[in-house]
Amino acid sequence: MPLMMLSNLHPDTTDDDVQAFLGRYGFPPYDGIERQEGDGARPSVTVTFLTMDLAELYKLAPRIHGVFWNGHKINALVLRERFR
């Protein structure tokens, strides 16, 4: 289950905003989104893609890493697996 963390989002960014942003850059709809706790200075989310494999996500991530969106430079980090 490939995961991608998007950080340095604008604090007012909604889940629908994230979906639209990813769609503009060729990402399929995500299957899950989770907001990460923090101090609110650099909000982040983790999105889950069940319909993609890890290699595809690694190819798409550079399209959005470093993109200036809503007044913030977005960081995209592909995560291999979630450990609980």
Image: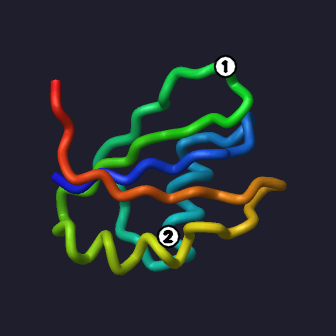
- Residue at screen point 74% across, 43% down: 10
Residues at marks 2 and 1 touching, judged by CB atoms closer than 8 Å: no
> Is residue 21 shown above or below 11?
below
x and y percent of residue 1 in the render? 16, 52
SS of the residue under disc 2: helix
Say which mark, if any, is on residue 39.
Answer: 1
Image side of residue 17 versus residue 56, left or right: right
Amino acid type, label 2: Gly
The residue carrying pointer 1 sits among few (fewer than 14), some (14 to 19) or many (20 or more) residues within 10 Å by Cα, namely few
Q: Which numbered disc flags the more N-terminal residue, 2 or 1? A: 2
SS of the residue under disc 1: loop
Give the quarter of the image for residue 26: bottom left
> Is residue 5 shown above or below 67?
above
Q: CA distance from mark 2 to mark 1?
A: 28 Å
Residue tagged 2: 23
x and y percent of residue 74 in the render? 64, 58
- Residue at screen point 43% across, 70% down: 61
> Is residue 2 shown above or below 25?
above
Amino acid type, label 1: Asp
- Residue at screen point 64% across, 67% down: 66
x and y percent of residue 16 in the render? 56, 48
Q: Nearer the viewer, residue 35 or 82?
A: 82
Q: Quadrant of the C terminus?
A: top left
Image side of residue 44 versus residue 73, left or right: left
> How many circles with numbers are drawn on the protein?
2
Q: Nearer the viewer, residue 24 or 67?
A: 67
Label 2 vs label 1, nearer the camera: 1
The residue carrying pointer 2 sits among few (fewer than 14), some (14 to 19) or many (20 or more) residues within 10 Å by Cα, namely few
